[in-house]
Image (spheres, rainbow, N blue to C red):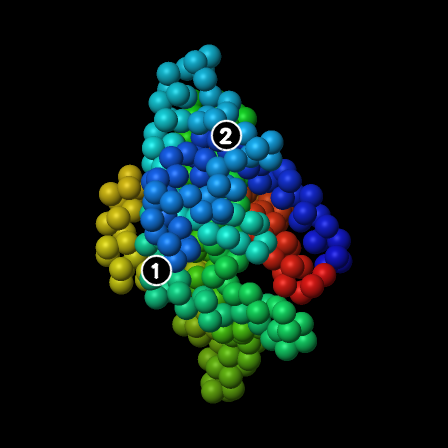
Amino acid sequence: KILGAASSAKILRRHVSPCAHLAMVHPSMDSDRSTSASPSRDANVDGPQMKKARYGSSGMQKSMLGMVSEIHSTAIQEQAYILKRKFMKRWTMQDPAHGMIWLPDILKTIMDTYQFERMNNILQLGSTARVYRGATHTRAAHSIGTAYLSLELMLHLLDVQPELFEEPFNLTFRDVTCLAIAGLCHDLGHPLFSHMFEAYVQKVASKNMLAKHPEGYEGTPEGVAELRKYTEWTHEQASVEMFRHLLLTNPDVKSGLVGFGLEEVDFVFIEELISPPAEMGDLLGSEAVEWPCKGRPHTHAFLYEIVSNWRSGADVDKFDYFTRDAFYLGL
């Protein structure tokens, strides 16, 4: 199954990461505005990585905006221009799974926080590294890759369907930025040993609590609520809480995002992207269910299937770890 997933991931990368089409905001634009993960920060020096990023597979320099032109409405052209300008300043790095990748520079402020940095000490596959000694990649690397694929997928949709800039969708750079942030922060709540500790919390911790209250503590409303904290705890919920904690303890990060153009409703949207409301499942097979999300209206439902796909489970989170895990496992 793992080998099949790895092969599928390679196929998906060719479609989900269409770098040749992402001319509007890809690192082909104005390299003197970019920052790099390499020790050299000289914006006037072209290193081999930036040269590789600036040119497509054909060796020709990429154009500014592949699909949007004068034939489109003024609204489309304006939003495409704003999107390009917002993402002009970016952060680049060489990634083992995806090659040269990039993120908007504003996301670097999140990556420099303690809440994100702690994921550099959490192995993606936990104790699996005891058997597959190469599986030492971290949750931080996976989160960066997921954010990158979120951008690649969303920007490709906008490139081939620029009408998404218009009614009834009216997508803007805020939607794209929120998806990238959600991809970057979707695993913030992972504890030590990742999913193994999650199972520990749900099973062992709940048993210990019940052992302390043999008189039937779980029979009271308060006891049931307390018990559910353990039995229904997930890392997605913890990631939402950690994201809130990140913004609360790092006011400069939130003020920077607000200065970038995000609004309060966008932070609600990011939380819903990380952990979609449980009521989303009720939408399947029913048209009478009220739209449960507050961050975006029902016209934006497809955005909720990119980072954490509540409908099918096929999302950029899996696209990244299929490729990354197979690489580090040596499969």
Distance Cα–Cα, label 1 vs label 2 = 31 Å
Work out which quarter of the rendered image holds the N terminus and state it: bottom right
32 is higher (above) or lower (below) than 23:
below
Foreground: 33 or 284? Answer: 33
Residue 153: image quadrant is top right
Q: Which residue is mark 2?
A: 62
- Is 91 placed left or right of 256 in the picture? right
Residue 324: image quadrant is bottom right
Q: Which residue is mark 1?
A: 112
Work out which quarter of the rendered image holds the C terminus and state it: bottom right
70 is higher (above) or lower (below) than 4:
above
Percent across and percent down for residue 179 are: 44, 44
Amino acid type at image mark 2: Lys
188 is higher (above) or lower (below) than 32:
below
Dot 2, how many residues are within 10 Å of its Cα: few (below 14), some (14-19), or many (20+)?
many
Q: Residue at x 52, y 35 (%)?
A: 55
Residue 47 visible, this angle: yes
Foreground: 12 or 247? Answer: 12
Percent across and percent down for residue 204 are: 55, 80
Foreground: 293 or 65? Answer: 65
Percent across and percent down for residue 115 are: 37, 64
Foreground tag (1 vs 2) = 2
Q: Residue at x 39, y 39 (%)?
A: 31
Amino acid type at image mark 1: Asp
Disc assigned to residue 1: none
Under circle 1, the secondary element is loop
